Amino acid sequence: MIEERIKSGIVDMMERAAFRVPDDVLNALKRAAEEESGVAKSNLMAILKNLDEAGRLRLPICQDTGTPTFFVELGEDFPIRAGIYNLITEAVREATRKVPLRPNSVNPWTYENPGDNTGRFVPVIHVDIVPGDRMRVTYLAKGGGSENVSQLFMLPPVAGLKGIKQAVVNAAYNAGTQPCPPVIIGVGVGGSADIAMKLAKKATLRPLNERNPDENLRKIEEELKEKINSMGIGPMGLGGKTFALAVHIEWAHKHPASLPVGVSMLCWAARKSIADFLPNGEFRIVVP
Ligand code: SF4
C-alpha cells in the first residue's frame, strides 16, 4: 500500500540521519580538524570519533535527537495530498520507538510530554506544491541548542548591505558556545518576518559542496564566513578558527519599508536526509 511505503520511507530517512551526518558535513569537519591545532583540533577529533562510534554502534550521534522538521516538495499529481501530514506524523511516532529517539516535544504551558515527538505543530512540516508526480522530502533533526540562537532582525531599509552583514556577524557573536559549533549558518534576507526565518533554516540545508549560483551572494557568503571565523570562537566555543563551516544566503522580495534578516544555525550534528518518492510510494534516498 502506498501509505505504508511512504511511512516506512520516512522512518528509514529518520533512522539514517540519527546515526550520521551527510558526507559534505563530515568532509568539512575533517578538513577543519586538519587546519586547527590545540584545543580546537582536540574538539574536532572528539566530534569525529563520536561520529565514528555512533555509526559503528548504531547509536544517535547526540543525546538531543532534535525536533523533527520536514520540508516537502509535493508534486501536484502525487497520489497523496492532505494525507501527507498524518503519514509524516505516524512515521515520527514509529521512528521515535524504533531508533529510539529522545521524545523532545513538550507542551509549553504544562511541560507534559506526549512521549513520541509529536504534538501541536510537531513535527514541523513545511509543504510546497510543485509541478510533477513525485514528492521530495527533506528531513532535518533540529537540535534545541542551535535553534535557541536563531535571530530575526527587522532592519530599517537604510541599513542596507552593511546592516545585513553586521546583523549576521552579531548573531554569530551572540551565539558563542550555545549552538555547539562548528555550525552551518543560514541567512534569509527579505520577505516578511516569517519568510526570512524559514529561508534562513532552508539555507542551512544547502549541501556544503554546492555553491550559491549568484556570484555576488557567493562573495558575501565567503566574506561573512571569514569575518565570523576570525572572531576566534572556534569549535564548541573554546577558541579556534572554525565557528562556521559555511554561511548560506537565501532571499525573497520584500516590502520597501522593511528589511527582515533571519539567521538560523545548524550545529555540527547536522542530521538531515533527503528522499524522492515515486507515485507508487517507492523511494530513493538522495542524501545521505
Ligand atoms: S545543538 Fe546540536 S550538538 Fe548541541 S546538543 Fe543540540 S543537537 Fe546536540
Image (spheres, grey):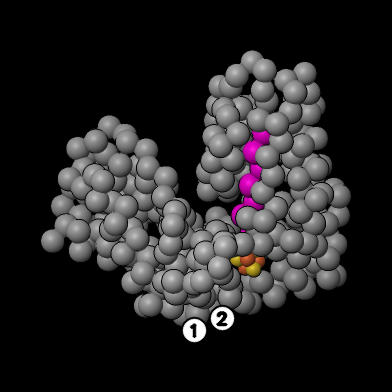
* Percent of width and height locating residue 94: 33, 72
| 189 vs 38, nearest the viewer | 189
Q: Residue furthest top?
A: 256
Magenta span includes 152: no
Question: What amino acid is labelled 1 in the image?
Answer: Leu
Element marked by disc 2: helix
| Residue found farthest to the front | 110
56 over 141 or under it: above or below: below
Query: Where 244 falls versus 96 (above or below)?
Result: above
**Label 1, on which residue?**
57
Residue 8 against residue 217 in the figure, above or below: below
Nearer to us in this view, 38 or 71: 71
Q: State the extent of the magenta-drawn residues as a range.
A: 261-268
Q: 17 or 240, which lies in front?
A: 17
The image shows residue 10 at horizontal and vertical percentages of 33, 61
State whether residue 50 is above or below residue 146. Answer: below
**Residue drawn at (56%, 45%) of the image:** 201
Q: Residue at x 61, y 62 (%)?
A: 144
Residue 240 placement: quadrant: bottom right
Q: Are marks 1 and 2 in contact (CB under 8 Å)?
A: yes
- Characterize the magenta stretch by its predominant secondary structure: strand
| Disc 2: which residue | 53
| Residue at 41% across, 50% down | 125
Q: Mark 2 is on which residue type?
A: Glu
